[in-house]
């Protein structure tokens, strides 16, 4: 059993050699949670606001503030688009949530989502060179219910300060109304990363998984477990990219979605689910066990235990299983493989084939920001998926344990940003036109600058390293809990 080190490069070695795969997987999850609590308390969060303009003497405050800055105000007054050049707006994203659907923990109260939203902003900066601000809002109305209109009004009010808005962890059905309303009514990109973001990276993984098993998108039978923001949008993008709707079955907690689901049809708030009911599952299959028989692909965006090994055993040869619930997947990779799955992916970075938003949103948002897009279209999300899939295949080649790039492969975010920017111009939602090379090189330079700043702060001890005892204590708690 290895002593934990700051690199966290080999999590599996931190636990007893005689642990079963199930114990090891459980221990890793507990270790990461315990360490997160300790480290967040140590740092008091993960992000901080810092100036990027130089101070060469105190008179510079007369330039940056009054009286000089009046010229900036009046210039933007006369042309609001000038705000993208004269302020940080052009590279600034609001990470907005009411914290009602945070990871696997559900409603954690508005402030409870801050750790996740700060994490999102952290990843944006380190992976995409994009500045992000965590904004958790209270969506309760006077009746004590979560009101989507309150989130909509909140985003509309903050729109003038940001170049884009990343919606996050908003429960359904509110998430559908919030996203679709703001996409149409705001003049900057508003997207729900749990929806379009997850769908984009899942499509990327599926494109390469199908290549590995030698199957075509139009031919495969697809089962989706879960019908929230993620899988509803995953279904939409997969269908838009060539899947056959008659060979797709989507399940929510009450069974298969199909035209016979009058309960879905009767609730106008679930209009996205009803679109799936109308388009898929013509045979009205209501049992997961039946749907799995002969299926080529299963995609889970549900909860732990939602995918059974005995169901996977009945799938078609060279079955593909994406178990993407976080932090605990619907089925652990080792169990899915034992049941006969050929390609297995999860949303976690400590297992092979991470199909996670972190590969998508930094590059997608960067590309949209650079051309000052007015929205992120589904076509832009699909373009990002193909960019990611292509990068993985061309960089190292693909196989059953490598269908996606990793976060360490910096160039994927630049390639993704460039393809998204080109698609934005094609879709007519870009304010400015740039070349592919310009977007690629600028994105890469911004990412490298962000990382160099963080490295410099660490080397000079302005960002202090956690005490190794934190890691050891977290490991010891995990081992004890997993035994």
Image: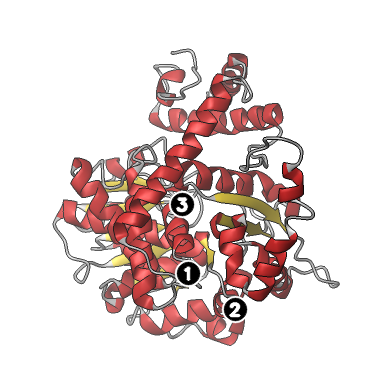
Of callouts 2 and 3, which one flags the residue occurring earlier in the amino acid sequence? 2
User: Residue 461's quadrant in the figure?
Assistant: top right
Q: Which mark is drawn over residue 373?
A: 1
Secondary structure of the residue carrying tag 3 is helix
Residue drawn at x 67%, y 35% is: 56
**If the image is split into quadrants, where does the N terminus sit?**
top left
- Mark 1: few, some, or many residues within 10 Å (few <14, many ≥20)? many
User: Residue 119's quadrant in the figure?
Assistant: top right
Apparent side of residue 50 relative to residue 122 in the rendered image (left or right): right
Residue drawn at x 45%, y 33% is: 25
Which residue position is annotated with label 2?
A: 181
Residue drawn at x 60%, y 55% is: 88
Q: Marks 2 and 3: which is nearer the front?
A: 3
Of callouts 1 and 3, which one flags the residue occurring earlier in the amino acid sequence? 3
Residue 89 placed where, x, y %? 60, 59
Distance between the Cα atoms at labels 1 and 3?
15 Å
Residue 286 placed where, x, y %? 41, 72
Residue 26 placed where, x, y %? 49, 33
Which residue position is annotated with label 3?
A: 362
């Amino acid at each position: 059993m290895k002593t934990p080190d700051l690199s966290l490069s080999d999590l599996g070695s931190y636990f007893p050699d005689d642990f079963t795969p199930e114990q090891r997987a459980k221990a890793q999850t507990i270790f990461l949670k315990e360490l997160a609590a300790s480290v967040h308390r140590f740092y008091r969060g993960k992000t901080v606001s810092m100036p990027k303009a130089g101070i060469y003497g105190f008179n510079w405050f007369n330039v940056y503030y009054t009286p000089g800055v009046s010229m900036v105000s009046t210039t933007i007054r006369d042309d609001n688009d000038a705000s993208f050049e004269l302020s940080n707006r052009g590279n600034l994203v609001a990470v907005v949530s009411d914290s009602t659907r945070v990871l696997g923990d559900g409603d954690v109260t508005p402030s409870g989502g801050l750790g996740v939203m700060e994490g999102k902003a952290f990843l944006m900066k380190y992976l995409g060179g994009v500045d992000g601000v965590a904004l958790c809002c209270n969506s309760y109305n006077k009746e004590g219910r979560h009101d989507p209109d309150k989130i909509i009004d909140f985003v509309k009010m903050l729109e003038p300060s940001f170049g884009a808005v990343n919606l996050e962890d908003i429960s359904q059905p509110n998430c559908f109304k919030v996203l679709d309303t703001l996409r149409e009514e705001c003049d900057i990109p508003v997207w729900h990363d749990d929806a379009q973001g997850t769908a984009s990276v899942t499509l990327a993984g599926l494109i390469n998984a199908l290549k590995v098993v030698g199957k075509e998108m139009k031919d495969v039978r697809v089962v989706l477990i879960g019908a929230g923001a993620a899988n509803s949008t995953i279904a939409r993008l997969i269908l838009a990219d060539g899947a056959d709707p008659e060979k797709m079955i989507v399940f929510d907690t009450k069974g298969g979605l199909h035209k016979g689901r009058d309960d879905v049809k009767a609730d106008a708030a679930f209009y996205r689910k009803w679109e799936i009911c109308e388009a898929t599952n013509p045979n009205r299959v209501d049992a997961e066990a039946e749907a799995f028989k002969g299926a080529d692909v299963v995609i889970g965006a549900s909860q732990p235990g939602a995918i059974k090994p005995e169901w996977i055993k009945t799938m078609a040869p060279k079955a593909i299983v994406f178990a993407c619930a976080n932090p605990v997947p619907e089925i652990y990779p080792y169990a899915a493989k034992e049941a006969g799955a050929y390609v297995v992916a999860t949303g976690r970075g400590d297992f092979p084939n991470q199909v996670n938003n972190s590969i998508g949103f930094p590059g997608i948002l960067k590309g949209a920001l650079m051309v000052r897009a007015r929205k992120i279209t589904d076509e832009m999300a699909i373009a990002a998926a193909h960019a990611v899939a292509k990068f993985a295949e061309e960089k190292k080649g693909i196989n059953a344990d490598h269908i996606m790039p990793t976060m360490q492969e910096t160039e994927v975010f630049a390639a993704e940003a460039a393809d998204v920017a080109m698609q934005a111009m094609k879709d007519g939602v870009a304010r400015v036109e740039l070349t592919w090379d310009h977007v690629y090189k600028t994105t890469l330079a911004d990412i490298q600058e962000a990382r160099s700043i963080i490295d410099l702060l660490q080397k000079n001890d302005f960002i202090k390293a956690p005490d190794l005892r934190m890691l050891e204590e977290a490991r010891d708690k995990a081992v004890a809990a997993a035994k």
